[in-house]
Amino acid sequence: MALRLDIQKHKDIPRKQLEEIASLKDQHWPHGVDSQISWILDNYEENDVHLILYRENTPVAYASLNVISCQMDSQAEEILGLGGVCVDRSCQKQGLGKEIVEGANRYIAQQGKPGLLLCHKELTEFYSRCGWLDMPCGKVTVAGKKFDHYVMSYGKAYEGVKRLAIPKNF
């Protein structure tokens, strides 16, 4: 069955697609579809991007890319934050996660900005297979709170970052 990647700026996303995204995300982070929609509406800016992978007309995977100005040591760096990566539970182990991340990678490359993602240790191997690099950092904060997990980059290798401050969750 053919796959189709739909990329929509947040400002252009129709309500139907927001509901599809919220349903996919709620399979993995069960807070309710309405809560998922509210979180997206409260936390996404108009130029953030939604990536939805369809098989036929059914959404099977999702990811987002958020435009974020973060602070690396004393330098401001505009990045695309990869977040919300998920695959419909009934479609897992079919390569769809890799497909959606590779779609995000292509978009990141086209934009000419580096990508960053935040993840738990058990996901670093998957993202490495998708071309992402480990980004060792000293102190990392996200939305003002200490972040103790892993940071990975795409499109740019970072070394020796002592302090990374990301102003919001993505």
Image (cartoon, rainbow, N blue to C red):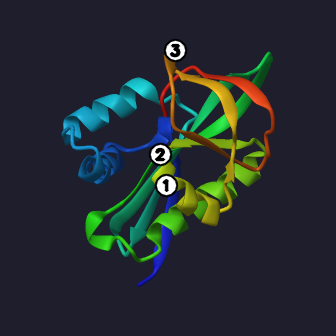
Mark 2 against mark 3, which lies toward the viewer? Answer: 2
Of helix, strand and loop, which one carries label 3?
Answer: loop
Q: Secondary structure at mark 1?
A: helix
Say whether marks 2 and 3 touch (CB < 8 Å). Answer: no
Q: Residue 151: in sight, yes or no?
A: yes
Q: Which residue is mark 3?
A: 144
Mark 1 or mark 3, which is nearer to you?
1
Q: Residues within 10 Å of mark 2 (few under 14, many from 20)?
A: few
| Residue 38 image label | none
For the residues labelled 1 and 3, say whether their Cβ atoms are less than 8 Å apart. no
Which amino acid is tagged 3? Answer: Gly
Image quadrant in which the N terminus is located = bottom left
Q: Nearer the viewer, residue 70 or 162?
A: 162
Q: Amino acid at mark 1?
A: Leu
Q: CA distance from mark 1 to mark 3?
A: 24 Å
**Residue nearest the viewer, comparing 146 with 81:** 146
Which residue is rendered at x = 28% and y = 37% of the image? 36
Find the distance from the CA under tag 2 to the CA under tag 3.
Answer: 19 Å
Residue bearing mark 1: 123
Please give the name of the residue rendered at 45% of the width and 64% of the height, measured from the top-left corner.
53
As displayed, is residue 60 above or below residue 56? above
Query: Seen in the image, is 163 located left or right of residue 85?
Result: right
Badge 2 or badge 3: first in the primary sequence: 2
Q: Position of residue 48 (x, y in %)?
A: 55, 37
Residue 100's x, y, as percent? 52, 62
Mark 1 or mark 3: which comes first in sequence? 1
- In terms of secondary structure, where does tag 2 sit? loop
Q: Amino acid at mark 2?
A: His
Check if mark 2's residue and mark 1's residue have beta carbons within 8 Å: yes
